[in-house]
Image (tube, rainbow, N blue to C red):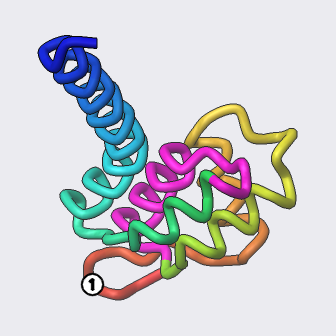
Amino acid sequence: MPPEFAFIIALVLLLCLMLGVAVIFLMLARPWLRAVLYGTPVPLVTIIAMRLRGNPPLLLVESYIVLKRSGVATTIGEVESVYVDSRTRVRDRDDLVELVQKQLGKPLIDANGRQ
């Protein structure tokens, strides 16, 4: 086998590996970046754990952002817990937000700290 052919094969394999890493990174980075930009940071390790547990990180992070921006004092762990408990009733982000507010009894708090 000529050295040029081996170099081309190695280059193609390296490009495939880099593409695979980029795709995996984008799957994890999208919810993480969204959370950071909205001021509700979620650790990247938590997003990886959500994906490994089979929970949709983007749905959970979007619901968490809505809850935090509307003044509900909650954590991403509580949002994920409610999702796991009522997975069959959640169709979209708004369903999950409503369930979190009901199950955890977390009232909405306005900008002045009033309920």
Residue 59, how many percent across, how many down?
Answer: 54, 44
| Residue 79 to residue 66: above or below | below
Residue lying at the far bottom in this picture: please name it.
113
- What residue is at 61 percent from the left and 45 percent from the top? 56
* Residue in the foreground of this view, choosing between 70 and 11: 11
* Residue in the foreground of this view, choosing between 105 and 15: 15
Magenta segment boundaries in residue numbering: 52-72
Residue 41 appears in which quarter of the rendering? Answer: bottom left
Residue lying at the far front in this picture: please name it.
1
Q: Is residue 104 left or right of residue 13?
A: right
Residue 83, how many percent across, how many down?
Answer: 74, 56
* Residue in the foreground of this view, choosing between 98 and 53: 53
Q: Is residue 110 left or right of residue 7?
A: right
Q: Amino acid at mark 1?
A: Asn
* Residue in the foreground of this view, choosing between 114 and 19: 19
Residue 101, how many percent across, how many down?
Answer: 65, 65
Sort mark 1 into few (<14), some (14-19) or many (20+) by Cα contacts within 10 Å: few
- What residue is at 74 percent from the left and 40 percent from the top? 90
Q: Is residue 78 left or right of residue 40?
A: right
Residue 24 appears in which quarter of the rendering? Answer: top left
- What residue is at 32 percent from the left and 69 percent from the top? 40
Q: Is residue 100 magenta?
A: no
- What residue is at 86 percent from the left and 60 percent from the top? 85
Which residue carries the number 1 mark? 112
Q: Is residue 67 left or right of residue 55?
A: left
